[in-house]
Each structure stands twice: as structure tokens, then as C-alpha cells.
Amino acid sequence: MTRLSSLTQFIAQKRHNTGLYIHWPFCESKCPYCDFNSHVRHVKHGSVDDHIDAIIMSLDYVKHNISPDACINTIFFGGGTPSLIPARSIEKILTRIYQLWPVNSLAEITLEANPSSSERERFKDYRTLGINRLSIGVQALNDKDLRALGRWHDVHAAYKAIDLAHSVFDEFSFDLIHTRIGQTLKEWEKELHKAIQLARNHISLYELTIEPNTVFSDWYKKGKLHAVDEEVASQFFTLTRDICKEHGFTAYEISNFCRNNKKSRHNMNYWQSGDYIGIGAGAHSRIWYDTPHSEGSLTRRQMENEKNPRHYLHNIQTKSNAFVVNTYLDADAISQEFLLMGLRLKQGISLKDYAIITGKKLDLGHLKWLSDNMLIQICDDILSLTDDGMLLTNYVINSIANKN
């Protein structure tokens, strides 16, 4: 097969499995660790109906100007807190999506939700509308740490939400944060065993990181908060993987675990450098085109929407789109993004796909050095990180990218 035919096949496969992300930027409160584009809704931001109408207008614009021939394979309502959106508005958005694009009959349609009672009341309505996967923001299974993380729900509400998800949805996941301030390995071990008892086929387990421009970051700079050292963080990481493996949960990505192969298809599309369309304040998009750059790499369009909800709304209402970035990635950015996303996965990346996308090959001498140091492994066409490599993910990926 020639490279040209491989490119054509690659583009067709990505186009046929497009992910659609709908961002709802509002929350009841802003958690101190959160660096997502989320805001406490205020009258200055516009009404709920205004923002729903803006999402519809954005969908129309992207269909007619950006991605007319996409086939939607996954839909993800994220945030913020999209479970604050009334069911009738979710229905309006889904109806418009189905009018604009062909949607896979087995599409994964996910909605993020918090465990509060007002949001739990909508679970059955969401399922009736076609949402077939729920992602619940639990974050901790004790009230002390929930308060420290700025969460509004208590552990009793979390248990009720998970129990309801079991009865309403065929598939659901929930998030927990580990390596929390003051948390011991013994406490996390006990909590994780409890979480696995509550889970069905998927669970997301994230290390607490102090992100820039968050309340935790401000506290850290003022000495009010101390980060966990790398050795302790490694112990939490290894313990998490060992316990999950013991219970049949595969670490298919750095922070995501599943059994029965029930991976998040939407997130897999990100990590495998698929096409995705981002709608809403701050949402990003990536679209492949089959015209190679002069450097030999494929063309990949990147778009980013205005983050401020009020400005986003104004731009949509006045010019039908709110892109603050609308350009094309250069060959180096395409290469780095492919490595950064793909090597998060246990299954790694295809060296053949890398060559098709970038028009070049990785530095074999450096790969051998990493392999000799037990940080990567190469089997036939597949390059992946070892367990030791996963502990040094950023270092390994940056070293490969910088050698290229």
C-alpha cells in the first residue's frame, strides 16, 4: 500500500469515528483544585436558554463550515456541570445533532454529573433522551476530604448517585482523586477497595495535582498547602494499579481503568488522535485533512473557542462562531501531540501510523536507549511505555519528541 492510499484510508477512518464534545461551562461552585473552564453562573453570563441557543448555532456553523462530512461516533456532555442542564435542553441539542450529521446507531453518549440530589433527579430523564453512559464526579469517599476538595455533596449522596446509576444506565463511571493532602496509603487502599465494590466496568482514578491559576495553587505559593513528593506519589500510583489489576480492572490509560474492555470510547478517540469537534466556551477541536504539509506530515486543523462564557455568547450571536484559535498545526506540533496523547495508553502507538501522519520515523538509537533502561517496549509495530516508563511519562515522551 502506498503512503497516499494509507493517508486516504487513515483520514476516512478518523472521519467516520468523529467525537463531538459539548461543553457546559457552569457549576454551582468552583472547586479549589479545578483548572477546567468552569464558572459559577451569573446573570452577566446570559440565560440558560441563551447558551443552549448558542450551542445550536455553533453546531450549525461547524456542520456547514468545518466538518460537513463527519460521522459521529461519540457524544460527550462535559463541563463544568452539564447535569445542571434541563432535560428539555439536552433533548434540543441531541435533536439538532441528529439532524445535522449521521450518528452511529451504537454511539456512546456520555454526560458528566455530580451526585447532588437535584442532579440525581434527572438521571432517568437523561436515559430516556438517549444518554447511555454517565460519568459521576465523586472525587472522594469520605466527608472530610470532600469538604477539603470543595465538593458540595457528602459521601451518602455519592453512594445514592452510584446506586441510581446502576439501576438506570447500562454503563457508567465515576472519578476519584488520590494522593490527597494528608492522605495515607492505607486510607487510599481501603477507599479504593470500596470504590471497586461500587463500580461496574469503568473507574477514573486521578492523582491530585496543583494546577496553575487555581485556589490550591495560590495556597501552595503562600505556603498553606504542601505538595506530595514524587516518591510518595509513585507509591500511590503503583498501589492503585496493583489493586485494580487484582480486581480485573485494566489500566488502559494512565488514570483510567476498565474491565470487560469497557473503555471510554470518547476519550480513546482523543488519545488516538481522532477527529473531534468541540462546542461551547473554551472547547477545542482537531480535524485531519488529507493534503500533506510540505514537511510531509498530514494537515491537522486546530480550533479553540473563547473561554469567557459572556464573550463566547456575544461572538456566537454576532458572527456565528467564537474561535480565538483557528489554524493548522505544524509538523512538530502534530508529532508531539501524537506522542503525548498516544503514549498515555497502555496499548501505545503504532510506528506505522506515526510514519503515515508525520512523514518521518522516530530516532531508533534513542528508542533503544529507552528500551535498554526499561522505560519503553517495542513489539512488532507497537511502541508503548513500561510500568516504570508510566511513572516518568512526561520525561519519556518529551525525550522522544525532542530527539525527533
Image (spheres, grey):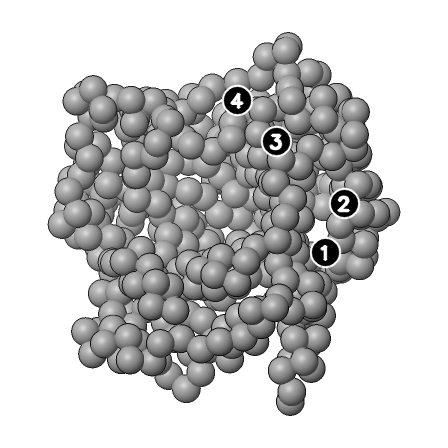
Q: Mark 3 vs mark 4: which is more N-terminal? A: 4
Which x, y percent locates residue 40? Answer: 53, 18
The residue tagged 2 is 62
Q: CA distance from mark 3 to mark 1?
A: 24 Å
Q: Quadrant of the N terminus?
A: bottom right
Alpha carbons under labels 1 and 2: distance apart: 13 Å
Mark 1 or mark 4, which has the lower sequence index? 4
In the rendered image, which quarter contains the C terminus? bottom left
Q: Amino acid at mark 3?
A: Glu
Is residue 249 among what the camera can see? no
* Contact, mark 1 vs mark 2 (Cβ under 8 Å): no
Residue for point 33% across, 68% down:
403
> Dot 4: within a 10 Å radius of its alpha carbon, few (fewer than 14), some, or many (20 or more) residues?
some
Residue type marked 2: Val
Real-space Cα distance between discs 1 and 4?
28 Å
Disc assigned to residue 72: 1
Residue at the bottom extreme? 1
